[in-house]
Image (spheres, rainbow, N blue to C red):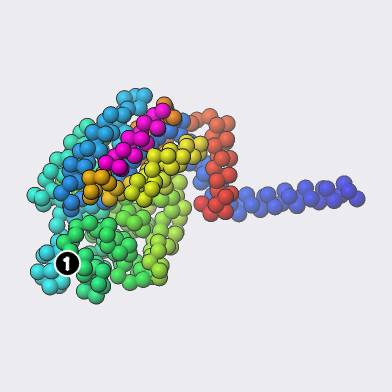
Amino acid sequence: MHTLLLLLLLLAAGAAGSFLVWRYRTVLIRHWREPVLRDPVVIIESDDWGPGPSEQAERLAAIGETLSRYQDASGRYPVMTVGLVLAVPDAAAIRHGDFAHYQRRTLADSRDAELLTTLRDGVRRGVLALQLHGLEHLWPPAFMKLARQDGAVRRWLESDDAATETLPPAVQSRWIDGSTLPSPPLSASAIQSAAREEVAAFARLFGGPPAVAVPPTFIWNAEVERAWAAAGVRFVVTPGRRNTRRNAQGQPDGVDRWIANGESGAGGVRYLVRDLYFEPTFGHQAESALAAIRERVRLGRPALLETHRFNFLGAAAVFASSRRELERLLAGLLREFPTVRFMSTEELGEAYRRGDAELFEQRWTVRMQVWLRRLGILGRLGLKT
């Protein structure tokens, strides 16, 4: 009787295990297929730079000087990617036109000549890498609709504040109509036209299309990917999921796929996952960034750290504090991970595309160990990703 009961329990456990494997097979396969890094890879990713505060050129030059004081074992400097917003609403012109039509000020404006020089110099020195964050950090028709009826947007226009990151969050999303919540999607033709326009604007400024695009507020869809790919973009930075809209409360919503590093998206773009934070202004300092990097190393994944330009602009004391944290992060990183690899996001994406045998682990026993660690993390998250 006891033998029969034990046999039944074993059969039940086996059936339950088989059911779980079948139910979560897509998740399990995704995290097995995701390559495992041999050495730590760390990239600092900064967004929202573009037309605006005059101190940007000076601050970026100082950041570049800081980065150039550190090197990995191969002599490479740490790279900070610069997610560029190529234009902002021309508040004065819009007001002068009585809010009838949208008008923009672009990065080609003579007021931003010093910033362009600094960006190009940083790329030449190997400490900066440029990425497309958008022609604007908003959808112009939605912005103009709200400019006529929303007090917060009207006040922003009247303040001559070019910092679009101070706009209401729903307005900052480029690839939805954030004037209405829940947000309706944009038409395919509108997306295709806007993607071509922003890639062409980037190419005019920097001599070629952007290799990497970062969707503003991480809300976009497959049509955006196809349009970017058709215009020359090869890699898309993601938070590990694709949010396609904002809900009635204005929060990112509508996840239609979960994403792993190196996976292919619409149009053949390749994905990279940025899910760590280094925002000293918000308290994300060197210690917390290092702890997050340790976890990514344990999981065989790159550490892409998000940091926005507001951490480095404004009062001199704010910049000094953020720069000091950056130095502490880099010093701690090299001390704890002497084999760390510094590279740009484009270079990392190319390594995933070609399956770089030097960068990625080939031994299946090691990959199995890392896969089990990844599943342990997924278990705590309810196996949703």
Answer above or below: position of 15 versus 61: below
> Is 303 one of the magenta-colored residues?
no
Q: Is residue 118 above or below residue 246?
A: above
Question: In the rendered view, would you say 107 is above or below 289?
Answer: below
Q: Does the magenta segment cover residue 333?
A: yes
Three-letter code, disc 1: Glu
Instruction: Assign a secondary structure to mark 1.
Output: helix
Residue nearer the viewer, 153 or 262: 153
The quadrant holding residue 73 is top left
Q: Where does residue 336 sit, x and y in percent of width and height? A: 44, 30
Residue extending farthest front? 317
Q: Is residue 312 visible?
A: no
- The picture places residue 327, in percent across and down from the top left corner, at 32, 35
Of 204 and 56, nearer the camera is 56
Q: Residues within 10 Å of mark 1 (few under 14, many from 20)?
A: few
Q: Residue furthest bottom?
A: 149
**In the image, residue 202 above or below residue 77:** below
The residue depicted at 57 percent of the width and 36 percent of the height is: 368
Residue ID at (30%, 42%): 321
Q: Position of residue 369 (x, y in %)?
A: 57, 35
Could you say where residue 232 lies in the image, as x and y percent from the top left?
A: 26, 47
Which residue is rendered at x = 45% and y = 55% of the image?
A: 257
Q: Which residues are magenta?
A: 320-335
Q: Is residue 382 left or right of residue 242?
A: right
Residue at the (41%, 41%) spot, across then down: 289
Residue occupied by mark 1: 158
